[in-house]
Amino acid sequence: MAAAERKPEETRQALLDAAFKEMHRNGFQAASLSNIIEQAGVTKGALYHHFSSKKELGYAVVDEIIAPWIARHWLTFEGSDDPIGVLTRSMRGVMKGTFTGCTCEPTEDEDAACTCGCGDTEGFEELLLECGCPLENLAQEMSAIDEGFRTRLNRIFQDWRAGLAEALRRGLEAGTVREGVDPDRVAAFVVATVEGTIGLAKNERSMELACSNVDMLAEYLETLRPAPAAV
Amino acid sequence: MAAAERKPEETRQALLDAAFKEMHRNGFQAASLSNIIEQAGVTKGALYHHFSSKKELGYAVVDEIIAPWIARHWLTFEGSDDPIGVLTRSMRGVMKGTFTGCTCEPTEDEDAACTCGCGDTEGFEELLLECGCPLENLAQEMSAIDEGFRTRLNRIFQDWRAGLAEALRRGLEAGTVREGVDPDRVAAFVVATVEGTIGLAKNERSMELACSNVDMLAEYLETLRPAPAAV
DNA sequence: TATCATACATACCGGTCGGTATGTTCACTC
DNA sequence: GAGTGAACATACCGACCGGTATGTATGATA
């Protein structure tokens, strides 16, 4: 094995990345540790040095890969007073893989790839369309049969909803969201519709369907703005 | 084994039912044939007499169990001219496990269990809340890695959407749905939101969340009715 | 009643799985 | 530069998996 390198943090990260990819495509239960260590370029000894079991590896993927990923792509309000506008742009960005709604430098260039340094490449939209949302996939598979997964995934969903609701509350104060809108209920509705849309689009392999649904959700969100001053 | 019984249709059905339960809880890949045959009360020889492989068993579950289940609980319009009303009742029925929207004798009794003879018992809502929608679960798990599953599940989604869109079209003609509504796009939006809602509620183990989302979707659907005559 | 396809039951196989026990090499301390 | 623990690599294990080969009982037919 030539000269060994001994970079434990890099090894650990390589294992997490490989595990994430394997789990994203095959789910957790069908994820093969052999494939993961092969992809990461290490051996089983390294894996079990860094993680005590397959399950612990899965938990780490949830906490250290999936959770930040969701936050990076969906909690992009950054003190904005227009949650509906930001959310609509985030949705379109995620669906198209352009991520112009990231918290990094926003760009006007619709064709630009993600510039937020999250490591997502241009091919991401195909991956999303083919493999779906990793958070939703894992939740569907594991939440019924493992409480550890369920609580961790649930935490991500709750943070997502809470962040969205918080932004809506600021919109209420700023007057960009009309009175009477319940931030928590709208947040839950949006999260459910987004996840359902990704799932349906994945099954039909149809980006058009995804975009149509996003547009319809955007239209619905527009109805939550204050009514224009009566003429 | 006392006197043998030789009822091939019952044996086959027992295998399908057991496979459905196992797959609903554990997914297809993690479903164990040993568990299935044990649950069905037969041996591996019987299984492989009726099904040529595990995958064929899974396909049969999709075609013969899941597809009719979806049709029974979601395609309940039966020539009604009020798709929004029927759909709203179906949603609430499925979520509460009362199924008052079934195509069987509709009942006014909100507490009644499903009377459509579909075999669903009172405990169904807990199962839906714990294990989610079997269609969505399988789609999430298998559509990316097996084309046979994907096409079969996709067919169910398409039939669901088509049935919903057809009902909306009748509503358009009957005047219970306002002009300008696109039946196909609304149908896709509804299916995605319903599936997303079940998934989210399953993960949070919260029937309140499910009901809240259903109510919000129902509110949205009400906006698709014709505007009341101007005063 | 002999025949024979159907409908199973039993026993077993190769392969893969997650996990472990043990060996080896590096980096650092003193 | 000897010692030591972290960071791996290698070899191996038992369990379970899907699948098969083969045996056997049943029920209809002739």
Image (cartoon, coloured by chain):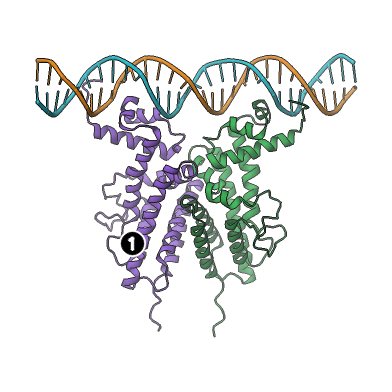
Chain colours: A green, B purple, C orange, D cyan
Name, please, the residue furthest toward the bottom.
A231
Camera sees residue A42: yes
Image quadrant containing the N terminus of chain B: top left
The x and y percentages for residue B3 are 21, 22
Label 1 chain ID: B
Q: Is residue B53 above or below residue A169?
A: above
The x and y percentages for residue A1 are 73, 25
A26 to the left or right of B87:
right
Q: Amino acid at mark 1?
A: Val
Camera sees residue B85: no
A108 to the left or right of A148:
right
Kindly state the secondary structure of the residue where label 1 is placed.
helix
The x and y percentages for residue B208 are 46, 53
Which residue: 56% across, 78% down? Answer: A228
A95 to the left or right of D20:
right
Which residue is labeled 1 in the image? B86
In-front residue for pair A141/A26:
A26
Q: Is residue A67 above or below residue A29?
A: below
A14 to the left or right of B127:
right
The x and y percentages for residue B108 are 28, 58
Q: Is residue B140 above or below residue A41?
A: below
Image quadrant of residue C11? top left
In-front residue for pair B128/B182:
B182
Counting other residues with Cα less than 10 Å from the Cα at mark 1, is it few (<14), some (14-19), or many (20 or more)?
some
Across the whole image, how many numbered discs are drawn on residues? Answer: 1
Image quadrant containing the C terminus of chain B: bottom left
Image quadrant of residue A94? bottom right
